[in-house]
């Protein structure tokens, strides 16, 4: 048996340790590795492969000089030369890059960022990628593919490019241009959308006119062409928007638009009903809706303005509870809730033309009729006139003077000396001939304010002692707030809501009214008398609500959820 060669045999021919030129230890290690590699295979048992045994070995032969080259052992050098790493270059065509850009936006929306603005920006990305090389934004989007953190770079680029445009503007323009693209694909064929062809634009506007589409759609599309030409630089957009025949056809479409019908302002009685509903309505959701209507009315706000209120102080009570999803109240639902509140005491014909926009224009109409200047009305309506922005910015409280003038107007309405919705010759009345808002309310509805409050609270709920005590507390609360006061030696209740306050010189007239509390000696006796009257009607089989309550529709699921949680 052959004996393994040790380190001494391997180094037999090397100089002795006493030699002055003894090699370094690394040389010995290298030689030892060479010996191990040369003889190691003889002493290592390796599994035999199928072609090394049996029939295949006889056919193919044993590994050696005559064996096929693919069966020979692979010889690899131990020291491979270093190779400089070259950066990999991604080569993709435009179509592949467009697909990647769209995929990045889909991933972004799937990750929970698909709010309304992100969804609209994704629509604009699709429109830009129709012909990305024809706009600067499209070229930059394609150049982002393959870069580190590509998804973030693409999203930031689109967001920065359209940051100065509002979400509503982007939505209108995207929808308008997308309808044009759909028309070209359907009626013209598979042609390039960009550069924009004036002939195709004219055919589209003529199609809108002949097919009786909404009158404003063509005019909106013409302004959309100017928008995309300025923002994205699409060729042909400005020329098509300035085409005389395109503008003429769009104008003829616009002339088919019906005459604008503006929402009328609320009258005094409707405002008082809203305030009664806010205080005494048993339905929590409807009472909250009435409060929101009053916020929009006295704040001169649109529904969208109310939805954007981000902070403020709570002046009264509030509900605590768990709610599923907080949804913004839209203009259509606000109109429905407004009508439901007014239907408690008014016939449908009296409020069918009121909409949510009536709330914003009510006090602005009153102040204009009262004689406030146009500049004061502009400030009350939050309209900044061009050229006045700097002065308003540095004045800090530009609304102080207009609001004082508005409060003077409201005081005149309370006294009955100012009738804002009367004919022009009878807007202002002498104090001796003034009709109080209590009398106006009773004349219009047939009920005093006390009776109306009990109608809202319902006679069934008033039978409960706790509900009755709570009702009396609310009536007393009126005397401590701007909505009314408790005065007189007999402590009788004057149900003076914010438009129902009256001066002492009008109390004589008020005492002669048909209000049930005029003959009472106390607040409790007054309310008890009204309650007894309503109970008597109920006992006689007469529905006290029948002649005044026109309940609107069924309760919505949102109201039921709100009431349940509260």
Image (cartoon, grey):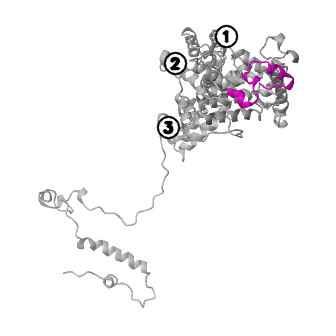
Tell me the distance, in whole angstroms, between the alpha carbons under discs 2 and 1. 32 Å
Nearer to me, 207 or 439: 439
Q: Main secondary structure of the magenta part?
A: helix
| Range of magenta residues | 500-528
Q: Which mark sits nearer the N-terminus, 3 or 2?
A: 3
| Residue 99 visible here | yes
- The residue identified by callout 3 is 106
Q: Which mark sits nearer the N-terminus, 1 or 3?
A: 3
Question: Relative to 306, does residue 66 appear above or below in the rendering?
Answer: below
> Percent x, y for residue 236?
62, 21
Question: Relative to 297, does residue 248 appear above or below in the rendering?
Answer: above
* Magenta stretch encompasses residue 65: no
Nearer to me, 151 or 483: 483
Q: Residues within 10 Å of mark 2 (few under 14, many from 20)?
A: some
Name the residue: 56% across, 13% down.
213
* Magenta stretch encompasses residue 504: yes
Tell me the distance, in whole angstroms, between the alpha carbons under discs 3 and 2. 26 Å
Q: Which mark sits nearer the N-terminus, 2 or 1?
A: 2
The kind of secondary structure element at disc 2 is: helix
- The residue identified by callout 1 is 259
Q: Residues within 10 Å of mark 3 (few under 14, many from 20)?
A: some
- The residue identified by callout 2 is 184
The kind of secondary structure element at disc 3 is: helix
Name the residue: 55% across, 8% down.
210
């Amino acid at each position: 048996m052959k004996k393994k060669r040790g380190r001494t045999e391997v180094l037999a021919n090397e100089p002795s340790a006493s030699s002055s030129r003894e090699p370094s230890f690394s040389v010995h290690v290298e030689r030892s590795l060479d010996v191990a590699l040369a003889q190691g295979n003889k002493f290592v048992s390796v599994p035999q492969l199928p072609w090394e045994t049996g029939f295949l070995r006889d056919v193919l032969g044993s590994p050696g000089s005559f064996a096929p080259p693919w069966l020979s052992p692979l010889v690899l050098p131990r020291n491979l030369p270093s190779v400089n790493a070259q950066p990999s270059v991604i080569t993709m065509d435009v179509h592949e890059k467009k697909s990647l850009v769209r995929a990045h936006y889909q991933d972004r929306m799937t990750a929970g960022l698909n709010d309304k603005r992100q969804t609209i920006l994704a629509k604009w990305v699709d429109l830009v990628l129709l012909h990305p090389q024809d706009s600067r934004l499209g070229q930059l989007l394609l150049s982002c593919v393959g870069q580190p953190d590509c998804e973030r770079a693409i999203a930031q680029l689109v967001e920065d490019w359209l940051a100065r445009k509002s979400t509503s503007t982007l939505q209108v323009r995207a929808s308008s241009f997308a309808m044009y693209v759909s028309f070209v694909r359907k009626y013209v064929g598979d042609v390039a959308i960009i550069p924009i062809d004036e002939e195709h634009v004219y055919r589209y506007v003529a199609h809108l006119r002949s097919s009786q589409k909404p009158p404003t759609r063509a005019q909106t599309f013409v302004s959309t062409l100017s928008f995309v030409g300025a923002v994205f630089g699409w060729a042909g957009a400005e020329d098509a928007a300035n085409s005389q025949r395109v503008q003429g056809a769009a104008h003829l479409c616009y002339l088919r638009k019906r005459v604008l019908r503006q929402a009328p302002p609320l009258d005094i009685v409707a405002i008082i009903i809203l305030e009664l509903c806010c205080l005494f309505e048993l339905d929590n959701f409807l009472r909250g809706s009435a409060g929101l209507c009053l916020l929009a009315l006295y704040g001169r706000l649109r529904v969208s303005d109310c939805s954007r209120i981000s902070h403020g102080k709570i002046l009264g009570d509030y509900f605590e509870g768990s709610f599923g999803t907080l949804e913004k109240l839209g203009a259509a639902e606000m109109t429905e809730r407004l009508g439901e509140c007014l239907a408690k005491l008014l016939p449908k014909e009296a409020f069918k033309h009121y909409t949510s926009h009536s709330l914003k224009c009510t006090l602005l109409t009153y102040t204009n009729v009262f004689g406030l200047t146009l500049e004061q009305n502009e400030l009350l309506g939050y309209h900044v006139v061009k050229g006045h922005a700097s002065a308003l910015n540095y004045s800090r409280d530009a609304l102080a003077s207009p609001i004082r003038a508005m409060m003077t107007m409201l005081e005149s309405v309370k006294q009955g000396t100012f009738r804002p919705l009367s004919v022009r010759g009878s807007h202002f009345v002498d104090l001796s001939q003034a009709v109080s808002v209590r009398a106006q309310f009773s004349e219009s509805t047939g009920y005093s304010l006390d009776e109306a409050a009990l109608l809202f609270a319902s006679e069934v709920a008033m039978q409960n002692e706790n509900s009755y005590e709570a009702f009396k507390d609310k009536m007393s609360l009126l005397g401590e707030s701007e909505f009314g006061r408790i005065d007189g030696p007999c402590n009788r209740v004057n149900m003076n809501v914010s438009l129902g306050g009256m001066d002492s010189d009008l109390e004589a007239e008020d005492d002669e009214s048909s209000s049930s509390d005029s003959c009472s000696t106390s607040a409790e006796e007054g309310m008890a008398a009204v309650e007894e009257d309503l109970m008597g009607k109920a006992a006689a089989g007469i529905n006290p609500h029948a002649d005044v309550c026109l309940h609107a529709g069924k309760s919505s699921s949102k109201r039921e959820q709100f009431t349940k949680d509260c």
